[in-house]
Image: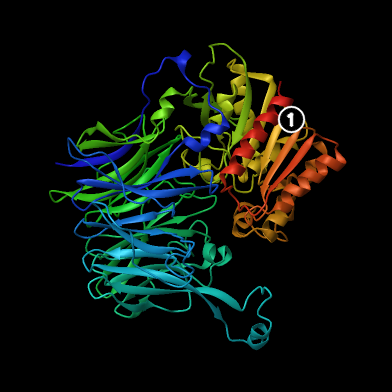
Amino acid sequence: MRSLFVLVVSTSFVAAQDRKPVTPADYASVAAFGEVKASPAADRIAYTLLTWDAADDARKGDLWVVGTAEGRAEPMRLTFDRANDRKVRWSADGKRLYFLGCRKRAAETGPPYDGKTQLWTVAAAGGEVRAVTKEAGGIADYDYAAKADAIFFSLEKEHADADDFAALRAKYAKVEYGHGVRKVSVLKKLDMATYRTTTAVDDTRFIREFAVTADGAKIAVVSAFDDTVLRSEGESRVDLHIDGKIVTPPTECYRAKAASPYAWLEHLTWNADGTKFAFVAVHDAYPAEIIVGSASGSRWTTAKIDRKDKWQVVGYGRALGDPVQFLGTNDLYVATEKAGRVGLRGVKADGSTAGNIEDFFPTKQVLALDFGADEGTSVAAAIVGDGVGFPKLAKVGIAAGGGTIGATLVDPNPHVAAWQLPTIEYVTWKAADGAVVGGVLELPAHAKPGEKLPLVVAVHGGPTTSVKADLNFDPHNGRLYFAAAGYAVLLPNYRGSTGSGDKFLTDLIGRENDVEVKDILAGIQHLVREGIADPARVGVMGWSNGGYLTNCLITLKDSPIRFKAASSGAGIVDAVAEWGFNDEPAYPIVFKKGLPWEQPELYRKTSPTYGLGNATTPTIVHVGGADERCPPGHSRMLYRALKENTKTPTELIVYTGEPHGLSKLSNRRAKMDWDLAWFAKYMK
C-alpha cells in the first residue's frame, strides 16, 4: 500500500460576522512549518515549527514529532531552547533525530553552547538534547549516511593564496582585500560507532552544498573557488569524492552548453544504491533544469533531463523542501509549477512520466516532499497549501488514480479560523501584445460584488520565480495585510515569471522596463474593466525586483495609470550600478545580454534613473542597511530625486544591519505599519 503524508490547508467554520479583522500585530502569532521528514518506517513525522518571539526579535525553529497511525498520540515537542533547530535527519533505526542548531548558555563561552551552529541529537521518544559536534566556530552543514551510521560535516576556514603580495597582505591583515585571502571548506567524517573523526575533503575550495550516499562511500560536492556569489553563479561545479580521489563529471550540460552559463547548482541528491545523483541548475531568465549524473563503469556522465512537454521545475524562490528527489533507484519526483500552483511529477531520466501526481489535489499546493518507507514501499511526507488557510499536517493516501486526504495530524494555527481572511483566486488577462498573463487576486473578506475597491499592485521579486495562489502573510510583498485593510491586491506573474511556459519566461531578456511593465499595466486595466478596481485609487509596491518594477512604474512617462501611492522595497534604480555594486553581477549580464560597455543602450533603457524626473507618486522607500543584493545606494538615489528634485512626498527607511530580506520581527512589523499608514494617507 502506498501512502503520502502531507500538510493540507483548511479553516474551521466561523460565522463571517464573528471573525476577527487581521492587523500587522497578528503576524507574530502565525507559526510556519520549516520542513518535514518521514521516519524510515513512515510511522512518524519529524518537523520543525517556526515561531516568532518578540523577546529575541526573531523567528526560530523547534523540533517536533508526531505519529501517523490511527489513534496516534498528540504531537510531541522535542526541543525548547529557541536554538533555530533545522535540517532534520532520522537515524537508520528510527530511534534518534539529528539536526543543526545554535544553542547558547550565558555561563559557557566555548562550544557547543556559544551560539555557533553545531550538530545535535535527541531521542525520537524525547529526552536530553546532546551535542554531536563541538567545533570551535561551529560547523557549516552536514549530511548523514544511514547505512554507514556516519555523519559528514563541513567547516569553513580562511586560505591565503601564494602570490607576490601574500606577505604584505599577512602583514596588514586587519584590512579588507578584494582577493588573495578567501574562505574555503573542510569536510569531516564522524563514525558514530567509534566516534572517530577523519578528514574526507580538503582541496582548498568552498563547499556550498554536499550529499553523501547511504553507505558513505561517495560524496557529491557543489564547490567554488571561494564563498562569493560571483564565483558560485558561474564557476561552481559538482565534484565526486570516491576512495580519496576527486572525479569531476562533465560540466558542459549545465555550463558551456546551457542556456546561460551562470547557473546556481542546488539540491544535490543520490539514489538508493549510489549509482546516480541529481541536482537542479537554477538560472536567471531561463528555466531551471535537472541534471542527472550516472555511473558508467569507472566513468561518470551527466545529462539534462528532457522536459518533454516543457514542465517547469520550481527553481529559486521555491517553496519549502527539495524540488527533486529519487524515489527508489532511478525515478525522480520533481516539484513543478504552473499558473500559480506547485505540483509533483514523477519522471524518468529521459523525461518521460514515471507516475505523475501533480493533479491528485487540484486545489492544493504541493510545496515539499520527503521519502520514508512503509512495508518496503517508498512513501513521502510533503507540505501542501492552498488559498483557504495556513498549512496543517495530515495523512494522505496515494493510489494509481488519485489521492485522498485523511485525518489532520497537526494544526499549528487553530486561532486563524476566527480571522477574516481574504478570498484568493488566480486570474488572467491579455497583455498589449496578446500574451496571456496571470496573477493572484486577493479580495477583502467583506468585499461585495460590483464594489470598486482601492487597488494595491504587489509585484514579486526575482523575476525568475512566481506568486503562488496560497494563503500567505508576507510583509515584503503586501500579502494578506493589505486585503485585510480593505484593498484589492493584484500580484501579477508578469513576463519573466515561471509557471507560464518557457517562452513567457525568456521573453523578458533584453526587454526589462518594457514588456513586464506593460503586462502589469494591462492587469490593472483588466481589473478596472471588471469593476473590481477604482481607477482613481491605485497604488504599487514590491521588494527586490518588485521594488525595481515599482521604480519603473512610478518613473514611466505618460503612464495610462496614475499611481496614488507607492512602496519601493530594496529596489534597483541604475542598471550599471547594479552590475558594479551587487553581489551577483551575472544577473544584469544575462538580462542585458552583455556587459555595460557592450550593451550601453540596454543598460540605459532598463534603468529608472533617466525617468526619475517623471516621478510624482508619493513613495515610501525601504531597504536593509547591509543589503548586498540591492545595495542601499539605489534607494538613497530614489529618495534624493523625490525629496530634492521633484519635491514628491517621500520617506526613506533604512533598516540597520538587515540584509536583502528583513529578518527581525520588529522591522517586519514596522514595514507593514508604515505601508498601511502611507497608502491610507495617499489613497483615501
**Image height check: is 308 above or below 263?**
above
Residue under numbered circle 1: 559
- Most extreme residue toward the front is 107
Q: Is residue 629 left or right of residue 1?
A: right
**Image height check: is 132 above or below 522?**
below
Q: Is residue 464 left or right of residue 628?
A: left
* Picture residue at 42% right of the left edge, 49% below the top: 61
User: Is the N terminus in the top left, top right, bottom left or bottom right quadrant?
Assistant: top left
User: Is the C terminus in the top left, top right, bottom left or bottom right quadrant?
Assistant: top right
* Picture residue at 30% right of the left edge, 64% below the top: 144
Q: How far from the left and from the top, in percent, is residue 310?
A: 40, 44
Q: Which of 135 and 398 lies nearest the eye of the viewer?
A: 135
Q: How far from the left and from the top, in percent, is residue 8?
A: 34, 34
| Three-letter code for the amino acid on which mark 1 is drawn | Ser
**Image height check: is 611 above or below 559?**
below
Residue 432 visible in rendering:
no
Q: Which of 649 and 515 lies nearest the eye of the viewer?
A: 649
Q: Is residue 489 left or right of residue 291?
A: right
Callout 1: SS: loop
Q: Residues within 10 Å of mark 1 (few under 14, many from 20)?
A: few
* Picture residue at 41% right of the left edge, 53% below the top: 81
- Number of on-image labels: 1
Q: Quadrant of residue 485?
A: top right
